[in-house]
Every structure is written in structure tokens, then in C-alpha cells.
Image: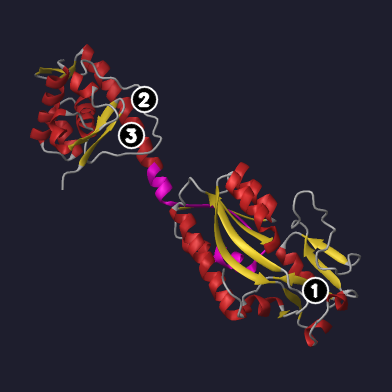
Amino acid sequence: MVQPLLCVFPYYIAPGGFGARGSGLRGFILPRLTAARRNCYNTVTTANHAEELMNITELRYLVAIMKWGSVSAAAKQLYAAQPNVSKALKNLEEEYGLRIFERSSTGMIPTEQGKRFIRQAQRVLQQVDELKQEAHQQRSCAELRVVLTHATYASYAAVDFLQQAARSEQLRVHIRESGAIEALDFVLRQGYHIALLRYAAEDEDYYLRYCQRHGLRQEPIMEFSYLLLTSQDSPLARRQVRELDELNDYIEVLHGDTHLPGEESTVSRWQVNPNRRIHVYERCSQFSILQNLPTAYMWSSPMPQRALEQYHLALHNCPAQKQQMRDVLVYPEREPLQPEEQLFVQLLHKQADATIKDSGWKKI
């Protein structure tokens, strides 16, 4: 199979070189650039032209000859065949019509033109090496910036990701919990890559329009009705709540960042006593309150059974609670997900599916 030859303005890299998006290499202009090579800018040439184009290996040979003083010494240091090094030097001198070195009994001495040529070659090689190093670091670095709704299965997916990413040489992970509106702001303005939103089904039109207007793709994860979450020692754990007003004497623990713009955070859509509430913004605090306050409860999505056991909690159906909720993943439509992000999304679906299976609820 013929390998394509990558041409990068304003110099050329033959097969076996490198390529990087947004490399920013500029300013290397060789003397006596031929018309054919000027016409090659921003084009892809086949390997049939490789003999006509300078490649990075030739530049390395050239710099090594200057450093070590002879073709034979350069070949030895580079573990290259001496004829290949000699041929590379000859090709460069013929192609650009200049004499790079003077041959003498004491070795190879660069001419004035040769010195200028080699200085430019050294600058290019330095940039090439920096790009290679950066590309290696990117390959060996697991990077993820994600905003999650207050969902236990999502935090489990994040832990699953970290267990796999821990094998990487570098780890740059930012995991934040927030409400849907704040999560959208983190994706659009604060450099986060993906967000898991939770919103009521009746608010879906608002979020659909918002995401379409801002170029965000939506990926459904879960649909559910809220369940009643309490301590296993709560009086509510021993009976079924059929009407919401049965909860008026209990304390509701709720997320403090779930309302829409312009909507009062104190408004209750479910007609439960608004005078007995605790607003908390972090899941572990909520679980601690439920564990230690038997009269407290909160509305929750389905949870993994191991989390319920860990925090000594119980989930109950409540026939009066008919609020349909949706968990939806969003990310910029024009930017493909990176491998680490794809892995996280796969793990998120896996945890959501397992949680739904345990609880008997359904996926969208």
C-alpha cells in the first residue's frame, strides 16, 4: 500500500515523520525552493515523490554531520548506514543548489550558507521533537472534565473510570456535581467536556431548545419516577406513603440547585410542607443526614443496591409521586468525544443499566 506523504507548510515531512493538528510550525523556508515544491503547499503527495522531497531524517543526518565532524562519525552515532548518510547530504546539496560542507582532511567543515541552512534545520527539529513529546504526553494522559447530576450511579461510573485511568502515566480528571443549569454553564463557558443533566419531563422543551441553540448534543441515559429515600430506621420505611400530605410532619432533604432560571427555589411542585426542608448541595451530606435523622426523607432516582446497604438507606415506591424525571448526557455537537470521554460514557450507560435492572425501572 502506498503511504501518503504529508506536506506541512512551509516544509515537508516524508513517510515515517509525524503529524499533529494545530502544530503551529512556521518560518522554515529553504533557499531555492523549486516551483514544484511551492505548488505542493497544503497538498497531499504520494510516496512516489519521496525522492524529491526533504524529510526529517535527512535533517537529522545533516545536524549530526556538523556535530560529529564527519559522515562516518554521524552514521555511527545515529546507528545508520554510512552510504545513506552520504546520499542524504548529496541529495540536499543538489536539491537546493548549495554547498553545505567543505570536505577536508580534518573532517567536514560547514560553509557560511551551510551554517545558515543547518541553524534553520535545528529549529525545525526542535519543534518536531516538542510536538512528538506533546503527542506522547497526550497519549499517556487520561483527561476528563465532567459535570454530574446528584446521581449515585453516575458517581460509581466515575469511580469505574478512575480505576481504569489510574494505569495512565498522567491523570487529569475534574469531576463536579451540580444542578442542570449550572452544568450547562460549565460545559459552555468553563472548559468542561460533558455534563449529565437531570430535569423533569415537563421541562424537556426548555432544555431541548437550550441545547439546540448552543450546539449541544443530547444522549438519553435514564427515565424514572422519583422514589422515597429514607433511613432503614425511619418510620416511613415501615409503611407505604400513599398521599403526599402524609409527609408534612417529616423533614424533606432536597438538592438546592434544581430550579429553572426565574423559578423560585422554594416553590414545591409536589405540594409537600415547604416549612420543613433542608437544602443540601452534596450527596454524601444528604446521606449522612438521612442516616442520622429518622424523620428526614428525600426524593431520589433509582440507586445501586450496594449504595443503599453502605449508607443504611431504603427506597420506597410512592404512588402519589408521579413526577417523571430524565437524566440526559450533553456535550458539544461539533467536537467528537475523546477516547477517555467515550470510555466514561460507556461506563455511565453500564452503571445506569445495572441500576435500572436492580430497581425494575426502564431506560429511555
Closer to the camera, 205 or 350?
205
Closer to the camera, 214 or 48?
214
Q: Secondary structure at mark 3?
A: helix
Residue 128 vs 323, above or below: the answer is: above
Query: What amino acid is found at the position of numbered circle 1 in the picture?
Result: Tyr
Disc number lying in front (1 or 2): 1
Q: Secondary structure at mark 2?
A: loop
Quadrant assignment for the C terminus: bottom right
Q: Of the two numbered discs 1 and 2 on the same chain, state the one appearing first in sequence.
A: 2
Residue occupying the point 33% across, 34% down: 128
Residue 257 vs 71, above or below: the answer is: below
Kindly report the distance in space between the C-alpha atoms of the residues bearing marks 1 and 3.
60 Å
Query: In the orientation shown, which residue stands out farthest toward the top?
Result: 112
The residue under label 3 is 128
The residue under label 1 is 297
Kindly report the distance in space between the C-alpha atoms of the residues bearing marks 1 and 2.
63 Å
**Residue 334 location in percent, x, y?**
48, 45
The residue under label 2 is 26
